[in-house]
Image: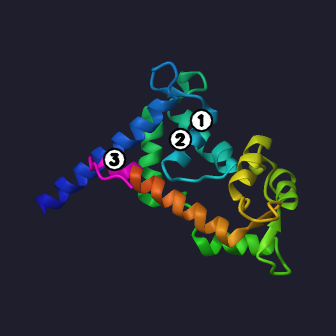
Amino acid sequence: MASQEKDGQSRLKKLQKVIKDAFSCFDKQQKWLIEQDEVGVVMRYLGQFPSESDLKETIIPELLEEDPSKDGMVSFEAFERLMLRCLSDHTYDPDDSETLLAAFRVLDPQGHGYIDSNLMHEWLSTKGGKASDFFKERETSDFLEYAKDKDSSDSSRIYYEDYVAKLNADIEKHLENLYQAARGSNRSQ
């Protein structure tokens, strides 16, 4: 029993280190504070993927409520508490492959296996969901650049099965490397 408790404490300390390291990358003034706009970026880096509306309507208000004296900035202490809870509850874990593929198939009713990048651009910037969830222009162009098949003769298409496989592999590799580093392992992928 004591061994399990010690392992749990060790894992917690390592997880806290990963959160602290990620947060510190955005703490420009080294005061253990970050801008509200950076919360989503840090959360996604750590493997939690809230929607923009979740950030604006739930997460940011909760973080600011815990420490209102920070002039609209988010403190490390509040962020760490939130991240530990989100990670342990798997609140904003990435969607699985089948969920992502089902979403793409809605946009491909003919079942071609691809979506035109112009249509995807339109959907990401003007349709579906809440206005706060729409992608910004840079996010849309970054997504399209990543998602399009550069080896295809028609690079205006997003072959979504390939995209989902690539995305999941990249997320898995990133998170494995991130949390492996926290465990102190020198193994690299």
Establish if 24 lies above or below 150. Answer: above
**Residue 159 in the image: x percent, y percent?**
73, 69
Residue for badge 2:
42
Q: Position of residue 32 (x, y in %)?
A: 45, 26
Judging by the rendered image, the residue that carries numbered circle 3 is 181
What's drawn in magenta, residue-wise?
178-189
Residue 181 lies in the magenta stretch: yes
Q: Quadrant of residue 156?
A: bottom right
Left or right of residue 124: residue 3: left
Q: Which residue in the structure is indicated by mark 1?
A: 38
Up the image or down, 165 lies above or below 17; here it is below
Which residue is at a point 20% across and 56% down the rendered structure image? 7
| Relative side of 121 to 150, left or right | right
Residue type at mark 3?
A: Ala
Spatial distance from mark 3 to mark 1, Cα to Cα? 23 Å
Residue 13 image offset from top left, x and y in percent: 28, 44
Answer above or below: position of 76 versus 129.
above
Q: Magenta stretch: residue 179 in it?
A: yes
Pinpoint residue 85: horizontal percent, then vertical percent: 44, 51
Which quadrant of the rendered structure holds the C terminus?
A: bottom left
Given contact means CB atoms under 8 Å apart, are the residues at marks 2 and 1 in contact? yes
The residue carrying pointer 1 sits among few (fewer than 14), some (14 to 19) or many (20 or more) residues within 10 Å by Cα, namely some
Closer mark to the observer between disc 3 and disc 1? 3
Q: Earlier in the sequence, mark 3 or mark 2?
A: 2
